[in-house]
């Protein structure tokens, strides 16, 4: 982790100042290599380390000492510009701050955040788990997005629900987003995982009086897998907000066709709509579109759809026939129903993209 961040600093020096850099340890070992061969002699690094000074100019290189309580490092820059000293001093400050942060003990919450965002390698995760006494388990990531700013009562309710901080991690991300990383080793069945989400929803809405939406991904059999589960939970919220607006709990596994439509190029979606509606999409009334959607949700069951919509069966049949005359598709036939379902989902997605400026 530390070496990766140090490499990023040296990469930024190259991109901003246009010069290579190398970093050595207090044993004159090369820690971060430059992009090109600078031919820096270890004897020069050792000689500089023995000097009681922070900077040293030697032939075509400039040496900078970076000292923290636990160790010392040497940054080497080539003397190719008048700004070398300024660039070196700024880099020393940045690297010193980075190294100081790395030496501070990491809390359990900070560690979980680092894993969530994919910033740690597998070996680092395992070593830190041992140091923080986090047992191996199976994990589920729930992303909670509140409607408006998260109220204190909401966090208190969640803390009371998951008060055992040895196994569960509750992490506020921003004013409207909270992540729960839950140990589900003994509750791995899909129905149990879903019930946890609804338990959260019911308690927060009843006790904290706050509306929220919950997305969750696939089960992570190891802690390092929560990064992927987190991405899936965010996708479930995003895609669910487009196609499942009536639902408050959205599972990645149940996104189904919605995931394909979401990833469909805009041009392909527009062509499909043209093929299905033959340019007559604008002539369809919202009443017709709503009827089709409800009919599809009820698995093409005319009686159940009419009952839920509080209309006569003949009225429903009349609307479906009106759509058939306009589009040439009989929604009562499975193949035509699938075409219309895809078309309506693509239509919804394109509207969402337009609102988002995409």
Image (cartoon, rainbow, N blue to C red):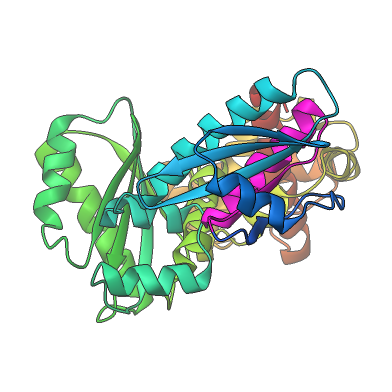
Q: Residue at x 27, y 53 (%)?
A: 107
Q: Position of residue 194 (x, y in %)?
A: 33, 65
What segment carries the magenta color? Answer: 1-26
Q: Position of residue 212 (x, y in %)?
A: 31, 39
Quarter holding the C terminus? top right
Q: Residue at x 90, y 37 (%)?
A: 278
* Residue closest to the eye, 280 or 167: 167
Compared with 126, 115 (above or below) is above
* Residue closest to the eye, 79 or 113: 79
Compared across the picture, whether 276 is left or right of 21 comes to right
Was residue 16 drawn as part of the magenta stretch in this picture? yes
Q: Position of residue 214 (x, y in %)?
A: 37, 49
Q: Residue at x 58, y 56 (%)?
A: 3
Regarding residue 250, the answer to whether it shows in the image is no
Q: Is most of the magenta stretch helix, strand or loop?
A: helix
Compared across the picture, whether 164 is left or right of 123 comes to left
């Amino acid at each position: 982790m530390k070496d990766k961040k140090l490499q990023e600093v040296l990469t930024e020096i190259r991109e901003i100042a246009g010069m290579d850099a190398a970093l050595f340890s207090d044993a004159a070992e090369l820690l971060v290599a430059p992009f090109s061969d600078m031919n820096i002699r270890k004897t020069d690094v050792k000689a500089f380390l023995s000097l009681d000074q922070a900077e040293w100019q030697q032939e075509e290189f400039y040496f900078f000492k970076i000292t923290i309580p636990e160790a010392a490092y040497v940054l080497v820059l080539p003397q190719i510009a008048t700004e070398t000293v300024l660039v070196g001093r700024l880099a020393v400050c940045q690297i010193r701050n980075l190294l100081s942060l790395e030496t501070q003990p990491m809390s359990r919450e900070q560690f979980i955040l680092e894993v969530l965002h994919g910033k740690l390698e597998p070996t680092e995760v395992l070593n830190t788990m041992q140091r923080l006494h986090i047992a191996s388990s199976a994990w589920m990531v729930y992303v909670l997005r509140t409607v408006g700013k998260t109220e204190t009562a909401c966090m208190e309710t969640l803390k009371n629900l998951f008060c055992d901080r040895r196994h569960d991690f509750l992490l506020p991300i921003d004013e409207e987003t909270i992540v729960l990383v839950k140990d589900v080793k003994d509750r791995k069945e899909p129905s149990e995982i879903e019930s946890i989400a609804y338990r959260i929803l019911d308690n927060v809405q009843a006790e904290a009086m706050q509306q929220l939406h919950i997305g969750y991904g696939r089960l992570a059999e190891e802690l390092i897998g929560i990064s992927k589960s987190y991405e899936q939970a965010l996708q479930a919220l995003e895609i669910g907000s487009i196609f499942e607006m009536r639902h408050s709990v959205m599972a990645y596994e149940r996104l189904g066709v919605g995931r394909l439509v979401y990833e469909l190029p805009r041009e392909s979606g527009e062509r499909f709509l043209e093929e299905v509606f033959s340019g007559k999409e604008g002539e369809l009334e919202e009443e017709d579109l709503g009827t089709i959607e409800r009919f599809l949700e009820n698995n093409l069951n005319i009686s159940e759809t009419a009952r839920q919509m509080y209309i006569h069966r003949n009225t429903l049949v009349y609307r479906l026939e009106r759509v058939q005359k306009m589009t040439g598709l009989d929604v009562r036939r499975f193949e035509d129903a699938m075409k219309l379902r895809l078309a309506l989902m693509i239509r919804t997605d394109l509207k969402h993209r337009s609102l988002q400026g995409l």
